[in-house]
Structure formats: C-alpha cells, structure tokens
Image (tube, rainbow, N blue to C red):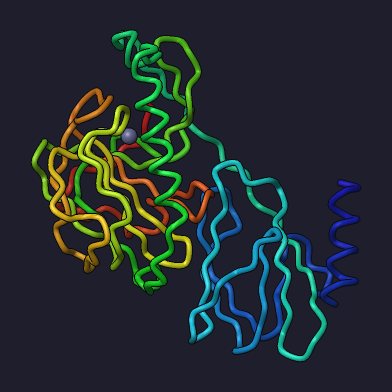
Amino acid sequence: MRRYRRLLAVLILIAGLPARAGAPATVPGVELRGEWEQGAVLFGHAPAGTKLWFNGRALKQTPAGDFVLGLDRDAPAEAELKVQLAGEAARTYRYPVAKREYAIQRIDGLPPKMVTPPPEVLARIKDDQRQVAAARQRDSGGLGFLQPFEWPCTGRISGVFGSQRILNGEPKQPHYGVDVAVPTGTEVRAPADGTVVLAHPDMYFTGGTLIVDHGYGLQSAFLHLSKLLVEDGQRVRQGEVIALSGMTGRATGPHLDWRMNWYDARIDAQKLAPAMPVSAPVPQPAP
Ligand SMILES: [Zn+2]
C-alpha cells in the first residue's frame, strides 16, 4: 500500500494527474489503446516529431505516428513510457501492469524423449533456436500490425497462452501459443499482412514452423504444420493460405499452435483475435 501511495504521488508530480486511484497515466497528445495486463498489446498514436521509449526501448513509429508495444507473459508490475513531444522535455509515465493467473497443464504418459531430448539432438535444437532468434530480429517495416487480426483457422481452443506445463511431472517452459484443435491438413491463413521471416519444414520441437512478421516488432509463429505453402521473404496478405496444419515436431495431437511476439516479449495472440466464430465449437480453456 505504501509503495502504491508513493507511486501515485510520483505520478501526480510527474504528470500533474488528478488523484484518481488506479487511473492509468494519460499522456497529453498521445493516444493509447489496450489493457495494461501481462500478455497484452497496446496500440498508440503520437504527433509527428514525438520520441517514445517503452521500458528503455526506443519505439519505432510509422510515418503517420502509429506505434505498438507488448507486455510479456511475465511483465513486471510496472511499465514505463517515456515521451518527448517535439520541442519539449522528456517525461516519464508509469503504468501498473495487471498480473494474470495462468493455468497449470499437466500432461503425463509422454514418451521420455519428448520431455527430455536425447543428447544427439541437442545441436539440432540449438540450431533451431538460433534460426528463430535470427527471425525475431528481422523487421520488415510492414504495416500489417495495424490491421484487426483474424483467426488463422477456427475450431475448439484446446490450449491457451501462458499455461505452465508439467510434462511427466517435470515443470517445463510455459505454453506461449493459443492452440486450435483442427485436423491435419486444415488451411492456415495469415491473420494479418506480413512478410515470411522463417519457413522451416521440420524443427525438433515445433515441426513445420512459419514466422510471419507484421512489422514494428509484432510477429506470428505457426507450429506443427504439415505443409508450408510460402517461402522465406515472401509477402503475404491477410487471409491468404500460408500452410496446412498438422502435428509435426513434438505434438500430442493435430492442432495449430499460434504464437505471437512483440520483439522478445511473449504476447497472447488470442487477445488480438476476435471472439472465435460461433460456427466453431465452443472454445474451452486448457485444464
Ligand atoms: Zn501448443
């Protein structure tokens, strides 16, 4: 409570805000939409000539002044936006970030090699990780990130963002994607315009893997694909079929795993997509 009061006092001093408890800081001239919550994405607009930094990272703006930022699955309780309007001194605004409760997902009875990879594949896994990391560094500069996102395919949601996985009793990396249970061979469509920055037919854990860059740090990854229909460097349009789903790599059943990143921050793709269409079976959260 004391810490919160102090934060509020600082906010009032810095931003000259009215003392309304819990009210996020508003920045004169800068629009921000989205929730300050772990895994969320916020979109903003600032007047020409504004400089912005989010948690110390300089934010890139489109020529029209649009920008985007993402809050990692484990983002700390406070985020910081530094704003320098043209001809003014820089000001720092602090935002409380809501903590999310993540489901715990236990999967037992997996073949041991799926839980702990055998030593002979470690070099391959490392190479996969290196390629994914390199793809994340690529920024096509496209404006697909500004479109309202669409589902790459529709169906029952069988896995959600952030769940802590316990495989054969061993705690593993959280699940970062949203899983849509669809039969192998289902068409996977680009959720927004973008550029393919990784097209790998067979990664150890993720199998057929595509990464599409939507620009300004926002990227989608599609995992366990049975067939890739696009190539590295190819530009894709929203709704274009880019792959067929499958269960390649280490998957326990056919599904599409759709993950999103804002640079290195793991964000919740489901938050960008509309509600799953009603024609699809009712979505269910992971157990
Ligand atoms: Zn998954």
Using residue 167 as the reference point, say whether residue 56 is left or right of it: right
User: Residue 280 location in percent, x, y?
Assistant: 17, 48
Q: Please give left or right for residue 62 compared with residue 113 in the image.
A: right
Seen at 55% across and 80% down, the residue is 45
Residue at 30 percent of width and 12 percent of height:
110
The image shows residue 133 at horizontal and vertical percentages of: 45, 45
Q: Quadrant of the C terminus?
A: top left
Q: Nearer the viewer, residue 166 or 62?
A: 62
Q: Nearer the viewer, residue 107 or 200?
A: 200
Q: Position of residue 261 (x, y in %)?
A: 45, 51
Query: In the visual, does 189 lie left or right of 100?
Result: left
Residue depicted at x 60% and y 69%: 59
Whether residue 74 is situated above or below residue 231 in the rendered picture: above
- Residue 49 in picture, x, y percent from top left: 64, 88
| Residue 272 in the image: above or below residue 182 | below
Extreme-left residue of the structure: 185
Which image quadrant for residue 105? top left
Image region (quadrant) for ligand 1: top left
Q: Residue at x 11, y 36 (%)?
A: 184
- Above or below, comparing residue 99 to residue 41 in the picture: above
